[in-house]
Image (spheres, rainbow, N blue to C red):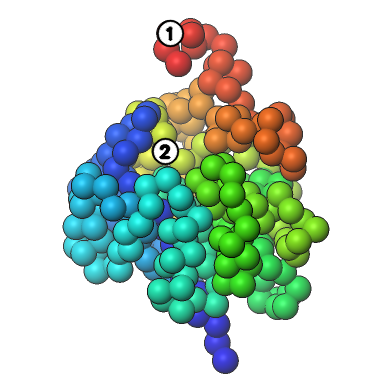
Amino acid sequence: MPQKIVIVVQARMASSRLPGKVLMSILGKSLLARMIRRLQMVQHRVSIVIATSTQPEDNAIEQEALKLNVPCYRGSIDNLLDRHYQVGKLYEADMVLKIPSDCPLIDPAVIDQALHYYFKHKGQFDYVSNLHPATWPDGNDVEIMTMDCLTSAWENATRPMELEHTTPYIWENPQLYRTGNITWETGLDYSMSHRFTIDYQADYDFINAVFSELYPVNDGFTCQDIIDLLQRKPEIYELNRQYAGVNWYRHHLDELKTVSPEQTRSLQQADPELTITSL
């Protein structure tokens, strides 16, 4: 029997750094709409569900999902693990893919690679990602987990970090779960040097510039197309260079067992010219 694969896109309006970022306009459509369209290019048969919170401000997310004809689940504001579990349960998933809504440049082929790897080794893994270790540019994050694995994490995870970030309980406990990882076939590691995700205005400027350059020519542009563009036009790379390597790990290094300080940067490490007041 074919397995039912559900991609969960976690999205919310609240953001301490860039409120409302998922509905910011990219070539006349919301960033969320642009990302959903890229997810719809995945070759494997998948269902897509937007998972937001029950907070009133996230009514806008639900309205956008309705406009995009994509199902929307509303749950806990802080417990993302519960949101993913409830979506998986509601839609009778065999596998759940976690794709954050701040990755509008994600390459659909990367998702297909991860799924191909999982099915090539069917029955050997509970969890497969491209993040442990990461090699693709930040913003190509793919995490696959079986429903049994997700259920187990939901039943056992208790720390706020584990609930907020959905999957740490899984990859922090390799003695409990069979985990696999795929790496960028180029052999390169751009995870700390290239940033295709959005948290800051500079990230929006970068993403908008990439879409403006590549989308009119090829709406299914790839990760390699972006890299080639940045080589031709390094001024686009410079738009958010100062935030390269800045990720959520930096807040939890004292809790994470499998993440080293070399896998994250503070804002000042990323750009020493930033002052304390600008942080």
Viewer-closest of 102 and 153: 153
Identify the disc placed on residue 277.
1
Seen at 53% across and 20% down, the residue is 267
Give the mark nearest the N terminus, 1 or 2. Answer: 2
Q: Is residue 263 visible?
A: no
Query: Dot 2: within a 10 Å radius of its alpha carbon, few (fewer than 14), some, or many (20 or more) residues?
Result: many
Instruction: List x then y, in percent, for residue 40.
Output: 39, 67
Residue 152 is situated, as x and y percent measured from the top left of the image, at 62, 65
Q: Please, is residue 199 above or below residue 115 in the view?
A: above
Q: Taking 119 as reference, is 243 left or right?
A: left
Three-letter code, disc 2: Ile
Q: Residues within 10 Å of mark 1 (few under 14, many from 20)?
A: few
Q: Residue furthest right?
A: 175
Q: Is residue 273 left or right of residue 52?
A: right
Residue 138's quadrant in the figure? top right
Residue 276: percent from the left, percent from the top?
A: 48, 8
Does 203 sit above or below residue 141?
above
Q: Residue at x 80, y 58 (%)?
A: 175
From the viewer's side, name the closer residue of 164 and 222.
164
Give the numbered dot on residue 123. Answer: none
The reply to whether residue 177 is in sight is: yes
Residue at image position (42%, 12%) is 278
Is 139 displayed left or right of 205 in the figure? Answer: right
Query: Can you tell which of label 1 and label 2 is closer to the viewer?
Result: 1
Position of the N terminus by quadrant: bottom right
Label tally: 2
Name the residue beneath numbered marker 2: 198
Please name the residue shown 21% across and 47% down the image. Answer: 56
